[in-house]
Image (cartoon, rainbow, N blue to C red):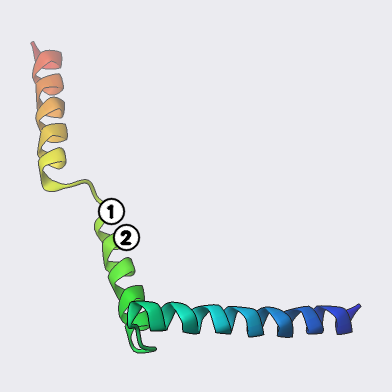
């Protein structure tokens, strides 16, 4: 059982390494590009945690209108 999984893992590593090398060659990528891609993705996802400033202002505006309506 474990031996079969080990062989499958080795085969996957072999296939995926070959595919990655082909992609790197085709797109002129180096190993140094991948950590940069990861950091760029982290930065992008961090920016998505909060709505854009314009949306925040619109939300606050509607909240202020709601408060004004409640007080009248």
Between 59 and 70, the one nearer to me in the picture: 59
**Pointer 1 with pointer 2, Cβ within 8 A:** yes
Q: Quadrant of the C terminus?
A: top left
Alpha carbons under labels 1 and 2: distance apart: 5 Å
Residue 1 in the image, given as x and y percentages of width and height: 91, 77
Identify the residue at horizontal 10%, vertical 21% (top origin). 65
Q: In this view, does 1 lie above or below 52?
A: below
Dot 2: what SS?
A: helix
Between 1 and 13, the one nearer to me in the picture: 13
Residue tagged 2: 45
Q: Residue 37's image quarter?
A: bottom left
Disc number at residue 39? none
Horizontal side of residue 47 vs 4, given as left or right: left
Q: Return the residue found at the far top.
A: 72
Dot 1: what SS?
A: loop
Q: In this view, does 50 lie above or below 37?
A: above
Q: Return the residue found at the far right.
A: 1
Q: Residue 8's image quarter?
A: bottom right
Mark 2 is surrounded, within 10 Å at the Cα level, by few (under 14), some (14 to 19) or many (20 or more) other residues, namely few
Identify the residue at horizontal 44%, vertical 77% (top origin). 23
Between 24 and 6, the one nearer to me in the picture: 24
Mark 1 is surrounded, within 10 Å at the Cα level, by few (under 14), some (14 to 19) or many (20 or more) other residues, namely few
Q: In this view, does 60 lie above or below 52?
A: above
Residue 42 in the image, given as x and y percentages of width and height: 33, 68
Disc number at residue 48? 1
Identify the residue at horizontal 57%, vertical 84% (top origin). 17
Horizontal side of residue 16 vs 72, given as left or right: right
Identify the residue at horizontal 13%, vertical 34% (top origin). 60
Residue 45 in the image, given as x and y percentages of width and height: 32, 60
Between 6 and 22, the one nearer to me in the picture: 22
Q: How many labels does the image show?
A: 2
């Amino acid at each position: 059982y474990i031996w079969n999984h080990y062989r499958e893992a080795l085969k996957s590593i072999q296939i995926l390494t070959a595919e990655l090398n082909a992609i790197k060659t085709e797109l002129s990528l180096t190993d140094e590009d991948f950590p940069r891609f990861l950091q760029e993705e982290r930065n992008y996802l961090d920016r998505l945690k909060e709505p854009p400033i314009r949306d925040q202002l619109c939300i606050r505006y509607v909240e202020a209108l709601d408060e004004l309506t409640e007080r009248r």
